[in-house]
Image (tube, coloured by chain):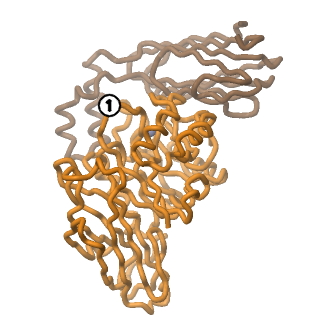
Chain colours: A brown, B orange
Amino acid sequence: MNELLTIEGTLTPLSSKTHITYQFHIDEPPARLAIEFQYSPKVLEDSEISRPLIMEAIGKYVDPSAADLQKQQWERFTPLQNLLTLSVDDPEGFRGSAHRHPPEQRHTLAVGSASPGFIPGVLPAGIWRITISVHCVVTPACTYRLSVYKGRDAE
Amino acid sequence: MNWIPFELHTHTPHSDGRHSLLEMCREAKKLGLGGIALTDHNTVSGMTEAEAAQEETGVAIVPGMEWTTFYGHMLTLGAPYCEWRDLGPEDIHRGIERVHQAGGIVGIAHPYSLGSPICTGCHWEYTIKDWSDIDYIEVWHEVMPSYKNHNVPAWNLWTSLLNEGYRIPATAGRDWHHSGQDDSWSAFTYIGLPEPDDRYSAESVVQAIRRGRSVISMGPMLHVEALAGDARYFIGDIVEDSAGRLSSMRLLIQVQPFAAAERYGDRMQVTKLVVESNIGELADRPWNEQEAGIELYVPLEGIRWLRLKAMGVLLGGWTTIAFTNPIYVNREQKNETEGETE
Ligand SMILES: [Zn+2]
Ligand SMILES: [Zn+2]
């Protein structure tokens, strides 16, 4: 497997509801692409930070008649979690996404097979995009690492 | 008309579900479902398994997706992947247009769930500039939906939109992520189709949902037919009397017990039927299973929509057990001060 790309970054809660897209060129159609993605931390352990965030969300989203009861039970909503999801576009369009919670993921795309969430098929040469959708960062900092590899055969 | 029970909101490991499509369809068959919609979060790749799962179980699979965005979750049915990542909170109509262009329909999923950071994007926050763009609303979400707090404002939203003149159907969705020990009951969306095999046509199912040819129920099927003038109307139809010639219509109402009997006995029983409309309750009748049906005459004056609601005992509580989508009335209304909103 040849490494095509490795990126690391650090996000803060201000990055919630943003997308980060990495765009790269593949010159020759590979037999397989592998993507490794991880981010950390996953959960917010600090209840000093969680409590006001949960209270605010309950105040914003729950009918006033039920809000007080929910606020008394705010700990039901802990731990809050960071959620980053990954999606892939080939030169022709959408090739799938992995909307799920585990913070360490490995995905492959090949002609005859693909990891759950992704669409098997030829891997055309041209501009590819990998998008990290930052649904939510609740921890003061969240680091991520993304690596892309291409392989000659479907090993 | 064939009324086929569907589950319209499901997930598999292609997003964050924990049962494969085949496992889910086997479970669906046991529950008595005739079809499901596959609505994984932000991907359509699960459909590669649909042919085999449908073949083995006979459960029809409608392609869909749950747009799992930062500002709301939106279900799509009958469309391939449509792009959502470039849209902001004011842009949902551009997104809906993409789904409509691709031949699909859109429904707001669980509009009043808690939002971020408790459940990311789960509360509907997109600005809707034109409600007639919305094809359906998931009014009942999760298992035991009539007991869930967040479905109360969804029901109220739906009802007030109907009162404003919008003809938006309601659906139920279990948001089914795993088949397992959880024996809580989900609601079904019965879809009215001309032929039984139409359930295998995604286009027919989508059409029926779009026009409100559906009934939401914990089990029993509610049949409502309206006879007005020489014409017969089903749930989702519009009673045409634009000249205002007719004074009343006749409603034929039946409650058909659900075939999978383990949901019956003393754990679920319809005890009362209510006909609701934009001008309030039109009828409120006790019901027991020995009855063959109810016939009602309803004056048309002032009526724009009416729906049937079945109340009764559900696992020890008393609640709504089923409701129909409306039958609408298109009629010149006398003494009306406000104009049509639609
Ligand atoms: Zn959702
Ligand atoms: Zn869902």
Q: Is residue B73 left or right of residue A92?
A: left
Q: Give the quarter of the image for residue B291.
A: bottom left
Where is residue A113? Give x, y as percent.
Answer: 67, 23
Residue under label 1: B181
Tally the numbered discs.
1
Can I make out residue B156 in this image? Answer: no
Q: Is residue B189 above or below residue A73?
A: below
Where is residue B325? Give x, y as percent.
Answer: 41, 64
Q: Is mark 1 within 8 Å of ligand 2?
A: no
Where is residue B319? Give x, y as percent.
Answer: 22, 55
Q: Is residue A88 above or below residue B10?
A: above
Q: Is residue B204 left or right of residue A69?
A: right
Q: Is residue B310 left or right of residue B58?
A: left
Q: Residue furthest right?
A: A28
Chain under label 1?
B
Where is residue B124? Give x, y as percent.
Answer: 42, 45
Q: Residue at x 30, y 64 (%)?
A: B309
Secondary structure beneath disc 1?
loop
The amino acid beneath tag 1 is Gln
Q: Residue furthest bottom?
A: B245
Q: Is residue A31 above or below residue B178?
A: above
Q: Residue at x 57, y 60 (%)?
A: B207
Q: Is residue B2 above or below residue A24?
A: below
Q: Residue at x 52, y 13 (%)?
A: A38
Label 1: few (<14), some (14–19) or many (≥20) C-alpha neighbours in 10 Å: few
Q: Residue at x 67, y 33 (%)?
A: A94
